Amino acid sequence: MNRLLGVFIFTAMLGWVASIILTAIHFWVIPIIPATAQLAGPMQVITSQWAYVGPVPLAAIGAVYYIVMIALGSIWLTSKNETVERILLPITAFGFLASMGFVYLQLFVIGAICPFCMMSAAATTILLAIELVVKFRGGAATAPYVEGQRVWATVFVGTALLTLFALWTLTILPLPVPGV
């Protein structure tokens, strides 16, 4: 059971990476793309009208979602608190349904795929699946105690390193360049 909870946290971290990459593109790349640029593929998805909730990039909302999942997953692993399980399930179910809607938009409305968006959708699906497996196996309370200091230190360092990795990927992604 503890391994499943560890996979839950790691999966949330991968969703975090995808969301941070997309958020960084929204903040640092999209503003410098000329208005006349013809965008295709992932950039067509990232700049579509469905990529925002008002002025806020959906990716930034996803980043908040994943950091909350990382934190709640860590609390869940270290405390085995049933309340955390009850809080997580509806949040993750909503995230899963939203992700399926965004996949639908990519496939049938926009007509283009964003690999980072799909990575996020896969992460949300895995998070929900893990929660359901844990729930049907009797809940996290059936697992042995895990020392909180080890978990929190690992999660903090892992998230920080993955954030640096996500920002580094911007230097190697084939992103549009101004004037091209």
Image: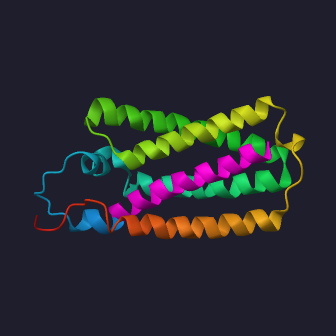
Residue 62 percent across, percent down from the top left: 50, 52
Confirm whether the magenta stretch covers residue 131: no
Q: Magenta residues?
A: 1-26
Residue 13 included in the magenta stretch of the image: yes
**Residue that appears at 28% across and 65% down:** 29
In percent of width and height, residue 5 lies at 73, 47
Q: Assign the magenta stretch its main secondary structure.
A: helix
Relative placement, left or right, of 127 versus 140 is: left
Numbered-mark total: 0
Kindly identify the residue that appears in the image at 57 percent across and 54 percent down: 66
The color scheme shown is: rainbow
Q: Quadrant of residue 125?
A: top right
Quarter of the picture containing the N terminus is top right
Q: Nearer the viewer, residue 115 or 76?
A: 115
- Of 59 and 153, nearer the camera is 153
Answer left or right for 146 relative to 132: right
In the image: residue 163, left or right of residue 76? left
| x and y, in percent, of residue 76 in the image | 78, 51
Quarter of the image with the C terminus is: bottom left
Residue 121 drawn above or below residue 137: below
Residue at point 38% right, 64% down? Answer: 169
Which residue is depicted at the point 14% across and 63% down? 34
Give residue 85's position: percent from left, percent from top. 77, 43
Is residue 48 placed above or below 176 in the rendered structure? above
Q: Nearer the viewer, residue 56 or 31?
A: 31
